[in-house]
Image (tube, coloured by chain):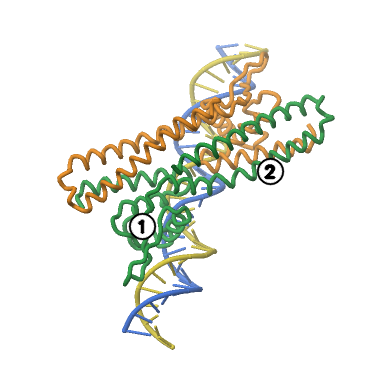
Chain colours: A orange, B green, C yellow, D blue
DNA sequence: CAATATGTTCAATACGAATTGAACGAAACT
DNA sequence: AGTTTCGTTCAATTCGTATTGAACATATTG
């Protein structure tokens, strides 16, 4: 491979690492995916440890996470004992899965809290003369309103469009 | 304030901290905003240090960041020397601004890289017989395609809907 | 103008999360 | 059956980043 092409490859790998790093899922994940994505041949864990200078453990864990999100898939190569992985290039599906995994579950715990709060203000309606109580009621309502719209945007736009 | 209401408030603050923490902008930011959001009266930096048990420096920095995103605004209270802050409850605008700030600029550096790559494969078209070269060309094209759609979803759906 | 109160900055520190690597189990060879 | 290769796990460690707090700058008071 030409050295210039190789340099571009390196930049992609570095950049991918920065991106995954900055969204809080670790640098190695992005680097691993980019390396596999820009490799014509399916790659092994050893290839990753060498190319990215990471430990065997790291390589194993990053690949497993990538597999979970459907970002890479294992391919069998006859005569080879090592596991080989190739990249999925349907980014829409990958990101959709990853987002659902990373963000989806977080909403639940927040919902519980919001529902608890709504139950409280409803139950203690008598106190709505109390300015403090009235204030909290307004704030909680605003929060609920936003949360519902966020859900709508999430479901109707982001996730759907990513698939097309 | 009733102790039950106070308990809910604490849970909101804790939850907000977890959320901002998990998206990589620090726990204090979320806690600070939640504290101010759920306070009937404008709050000072000292209020924050006491309520959240954080240092003066932390309080100062978190509030400045929140101000940057329009999440809180300073209000003048006559006779008081300290700065007082109240929360903006237009979450759509807040998140829009924060997202633009956090994500927007990241796209640029990636774009540069992508454009460099496209320039390269175009310039060296002669080598397109080379399987390696052809492979890279395909991968880069896929990436470009996804990036453009991501931009479209971003502009047309997410940012616009957050404002309504 | 000195004294006090307040907000900001940034080098030092503390903390948590990412990474390592040795130990282990499983599978494939001889 | 014994030996080697490979992938996984998880306690120990490393590393980066959030947080602190002392020093400083600025504004306010008497």
Residue pushed farthest right? B126
**Which sits in the foreground, A109 or A52?**
A109
CB contact under 8 Å: marks 1 and 2: no
Q: How many marks overall?
A: 2
Q: Which residue is mark 2?
A: B112
Q: Position of residue A52 (x, y in %)?
A: 65, 36
**Which sits in the foreground, A31 or B76?**
B76
Residue B7 left/right relative to B53: left
Secondary structure under tag 1 reads strand
**Location of residue B67 by image quarter:** bottom left
Residue A148 left/right relative to B134: left
Q: Which residue is mark 1?
A: B86
Residue count near mark 2 (Cα–Cα under 10 Å), binned few <14, some 14–19, many ≥20: few
Q: Quadrant of the C terminus of chain A?
A: top right
Chain containing mark 1: B
**Location of residue B114 by image quarter:** top right
**Location of residue A140 by image quarter:** top left
- Work out whether disc 1 and disc 2 sit on a shared chain: yes
Q: Position of residue B43 (x, y in %)?
A: 33, 60
Q: Position of residue B44 (x, y in %)?
A: 35, 62
Sooner in the amino-acid sequence: mark 1 or mark 2: 1
Q: Nearer the viewer, mark 1 or mark 2?
A: 1
Secondary structure under tag 2 reads helix
Image position of B128 with respect to A125: above or below:
above
Residue at (73, 29) in percent of width and height: B137
Residue at (41, 43) in percent of width and height: B19
């Amino acid at each position: 491979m030409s050295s210039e092409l190789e340099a571009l490859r390196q930049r992609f790998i570095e950049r991918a690492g920065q991106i995954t790093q900055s969204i809080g899922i670790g640098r190695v994940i992005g680097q691993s995916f980019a390396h596999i994505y820009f490799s014509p041949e399916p790659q092994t864990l050893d290839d990753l440890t060498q190319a990215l200078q990471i430990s065997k453990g790291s390589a194993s864990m990053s690949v497993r996470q990538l597999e979970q999100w459907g970002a890479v898939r294992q391919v069998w190569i006859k005569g080879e004992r090592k596991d080989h992985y190739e990249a999925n290039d349907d980014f829409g599906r990958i990101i959709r899965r990853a987002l659902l995994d990373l963000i989806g579950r977080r909403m639940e715990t927040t919902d519980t809290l919001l529902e608890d709060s709504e139950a409280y203000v409803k139950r203690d309606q008598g106190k709505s003369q109390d300015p403090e109580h009235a204030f909290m009621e307004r704030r909680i309502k605003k929060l609920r309103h936003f949360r519902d719209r966020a859900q709508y945007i999430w479901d109707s736009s982001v996730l759907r469009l990513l698939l097309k």
